[in-house]
Amino acid sequence: MKLEEKPGRKPGHAEASAVLTAALGTARFPASKEALVKDVGAWKIPVGSGQKVALREILEAIPEEQFSSSADAQNRIDAHWDKVSARLREAGE
């Protein structure tokens, strides 16, 4: 089974994850959400169907305010991805 075929994985997840990892890898941690928005908020993250959104929009869609590491930030974004997706859909309407 390919990574893209695992339950819960959407097509393009690997690409989005790779770009998110690269973006967060340039930030200094620990970091506040505000600092991340300032430092890496302009990075464009692919979210499917050829659409890309600024990392700023993704960060603003999650409730956490502090992140201890890039892995922590990525895990929290992944944990709230349904909320992020819903907010992005609402913004696009």
Image (cartoon, rainbow, N blue to C red):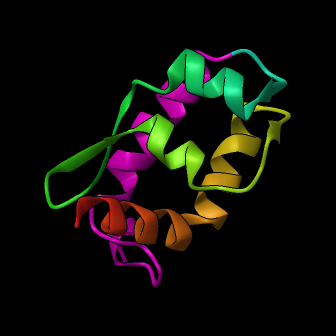
Q: Which residues are magenta?
A: 1-27
Residue at the spot 32% in from the left edge and 43% down from the top edge: 53
Whether 6 is among the magenta residues is yes
Of residues 9 and 44, the one drawn nearer to the viewer in this rendering: 44
Residue at the spot 64% in from the left edge and 55% down from the top edge: 62
Give percent across and percent down for residue 35.
69, 21
Residue at the spot 39% in from the left edge and 27% down from the top edge: 43
Q: Quadrant of residue 49?
A: bottom left
Quadrant containing the C terminus in the rendered view: bottom left
Of residues 60 and 28, the one drawn nearer to the viewer in this rendering: 60
Give percent across and percent down for residue 56.
49, 36
State the count of labels: 0
Q: Quadrant of residue 28?
A: top right
Give percent across and percent down for residue 25.
59, 22
Q: Quadrant of residue 87?
A: bottom left
Residue at the spot 83% in from the left edge and 38% down from the top edge: 66
90 to 31, vertically: above or below: below
Q: Is residue 41 left or right of residue 45?
A: right
37 to 6, vertically: above or below: above
Quadrant containing the N terminus in the rendered view: bottom left
Q: Is residue 84 left or right of residue 11?
A: right
Whether 31 is among the magenta residues is no
Q: Is residue 65 left or right of residue 26?
A: right
Of residues 65 and 76, the one drawn nearer to the viewer in this rendering: 65
Q: Is residue 80 left or right of residue 44?
A: right
Give percent across and percent down for residue 64.
77, 50
40 to 87, vertically: above or below: above
Q: Residue furthest left?
A: 50
